[in-house]
Image (cartoon, rainbow, N blue to C red):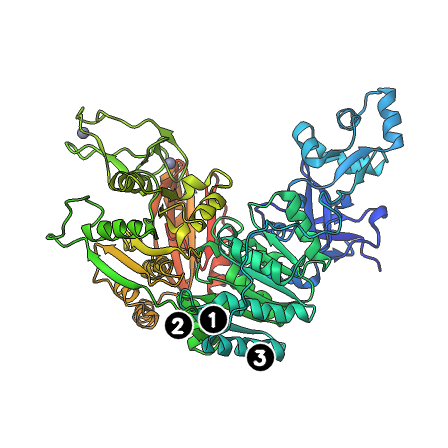
Amino acid sequence: MKARFVRVAVPRPVDDTFYYRIPDHLEDCIQPGAVVLAPFGKRTITCVVVDLADSSPVKARSLLALTGAPSLDPGLLELARWTAGYYHSPLGLILRMFLPPQERNRGAKFRLTTVGKEVRERHEEGPFDRLLELLSRGPRTSTYLDDRTDTGKIDEAIEIGLIETVLPSATGPPGGVPALRRIRVEQKVLELTPHQSKALKGILESIDEAGFSVTLLHGITGSGKTEVYLRAARKLLDSGRGVLLLVPEIALTPLLTARLDTMAPGKVAVFHSGVPDGERRNAWEALASGRARLAVGVRSGVFAPVPDLGLIIVDEEHDSSYRQEEAPSYNARDVAVKRGQLEGIPVILGSATPSLESYRNAETGRYRLAVLPDRATASENPGIELVNMADPKLDRSAHPFLSAKLLSELQDTVKRGEQSIIFLNRRGFAPFLLCPECNFTLACPNCSVTLTYHRSRGMLCHYCGHVQAPLSICPSCGGKRVAPVGTGTQRIEEVLQSILPDAVVERLDRDKMEKRGTLEDIFRRMDSGEIQVLVGTQILAKGHDFPGVTLVGILNAEQALDFPDFRAAERTFQLITQVSGRSGRGGTRGRVIVQSYSPKHYAVVAALDQDYSVFYRTEIAIRKEFGYPPFKRMGRIILDGISEKKVAAAIGELVSSIPQADGIRILGPSPAPLPKIQNRHRWHFLLLADSHRHLSAALKKTGAFRFPGIRIHVRVDPYNMM
Ligand SMILES: [Zn+2]
Ligand SMILES: [Zn+2]
């Protein structure tokens, strides 16, 4: 018997799937994975068919059309199901990540049929007047119609033959792979070091074995991991198979994409938010059709369609940008490993500072381990020096936040015509305004955080975007000495410019990057040597190569340690190591100066010694003792709402519904470390379990709860603990 109905997952935060009838004109062309248009409430939506059905338990409406987007193959559909199930994320929102960008935003167009035009010209009154009028001037998208009228009856209008769908056509050059921005690539054939050769050999063997395996490529900064990736990728491409490469931030790796394009001209498709929708759609179709064979993307690139995929590479696997916390929440690194398993292919995870989870997997033999312990070029590891900012005898005559040591090194580096990077993980001018007479600080009216002082924009909330003018008189005591306290990148930039009046000082942080093209501009000016001192936030830690940099200064290195987060030490170690690794990559030996207020902390000490294994052994013992990941699985549940009393009562009810069996441990509930964002009070609790299965079963219990006005956020393997 032919299936007459389908179940679809809709891109809405709901767990249910919905039944639809297959209309006659779509008979025989609907399969699971098909991307279709369907009426939903008063709107028209793009969604994915997850199942066929012979009957429907409810009165089902009709599907409208196929969108023309490539169908998801059964493997991708299975990956979507796994991701939704594992992370307790709505399937429809996860499936949305698998669709080409314009399908998500625009969908197909509708136009009048000949019959529709006749009806419209007769100007008779009827239920479809407004719809016909809107379409009388030509085809329109469902988004356009949704904004102007109720499109809930569009299925009826199609059925009686008044309107029809027009499939979207690709906007770019047909058949092409989007052109990459050309940049200069030196074409020197690099000789592999013995360690690189050995690592590559192991990876090539795993490719030849033709089955699922994960190799953790642990290579220090500057050890040439990229060269190993490229050669492994080339082997796959030469045999006609596809490769998926994930990176934390594409904008920072133009050199990598250029090298890939040189290696496989016309075969590379790049995805990231900076690429316009049209180009991204072309990249998507080039991949789905097999014209492009190498997909390079950030987080959501893990869902890209790559037929006959043969290898997945996740660069900087420890990077937190792979983790999406907001719905639909998932971790692209872990989804990549699952995808490798489902497709039966090798996965490479690369990092200079592997996450505890991945290194533990290598230690227990679940992952293979390949090590690159030396820098690939002749350059030596940078010399790292500590300045103890807590030392009362420290010379602070030049500036309270900048040690005399760092300043004199900086001046020498500028004099020698070399470049420096100053790292501080706090944007803005100063973290807050303080009245020294009564200790009043200016807080956000909507969130439980102080407002950050920005030179150009005034007082800004980094959580809700609230802006107000800075104060000069204290509203609490009338005192007149209200002043910015502490320091951010803007202030450091200003101070350094005044100390080094002849040097070109630039700043790179999120505020700067709001202007499109800034990153490329700064990259170019660093490359040409024009910029002498670059001040920036963690964007500088993401694996970029500035060969002219010989000095790195790290201010307030242990800032992450102040956060109530079991990964605080790991983040601190990673940050110091990664930022230090920017120094001396061009041949001249680099120097690193780390200013720290807690120089005895094991994460700081291990980073200064450039010793991952000491850090790992210390940290893994602590995780084991406290029963944290990777030894236990963690879930975090956050409730938020306007009334704190109701939030607290609701979370209490939720917690008491979870049986503390199967080794389940509950920490909390309590107000979240950030107890209020955008006027919503936040409470949370943590769940720890021996296995993902037990964790998942406990989390499922919470799925049945509904509290009016309260949102429930479920996070599996959470990264953000605020
Ligand atoms: Zn005051
Ligand atoms: Zn706010």
Q: Nearer the viewer, residue 441 or 174?
A: 174
- Mark 2 lies on a secondary structure that is loop
Residue at the limit of the structure toward the front, as seen here: 416
Q: Which of 390 and 385 is in front in this view?
A: 385
- Rendered position, 229 above or below 483: below
**Residue 541, position as x, y percentages in the image:** 40, 55
Q: Which of marks 1 and 2 is nearer the N terminus?
A: 1
What residue sits right under mark 2 in the picture? 374
Q: Which of marks 3 and 1 is nearer the N terminus?
A: 3
The yes-or-no answer for disc 2 within 8 Å of ligand 2 is no
What residue sits right under mark 1 in the picture? 217
Which of the 4 image quadrants contains residue 125?
top right
Between the residue at mark 3 and the residue at mark 1, the CA separation in whole angstroms equals 14 Å
Between the residue at mark 3 and the residue at mark 2, the CA separation in whole angstroms equals 23 Å
Instruction: Identify residue type, mark 3.
Output: Glu
Instruction: Identify residue type, mark 1.
Output: Leu
Between the residue at mark 1 and the residue at mark 2, the CA separation in whole angstroms equals 13 Å
Q: Nearer the viewer, residue 509 or 19?
A: 509
| Front disc: 1 or 2 | 2
Check residue 205 in the rendering and tell me which mark sits there, or answer none.
3
Residue 88 can be seen, yes or no? no
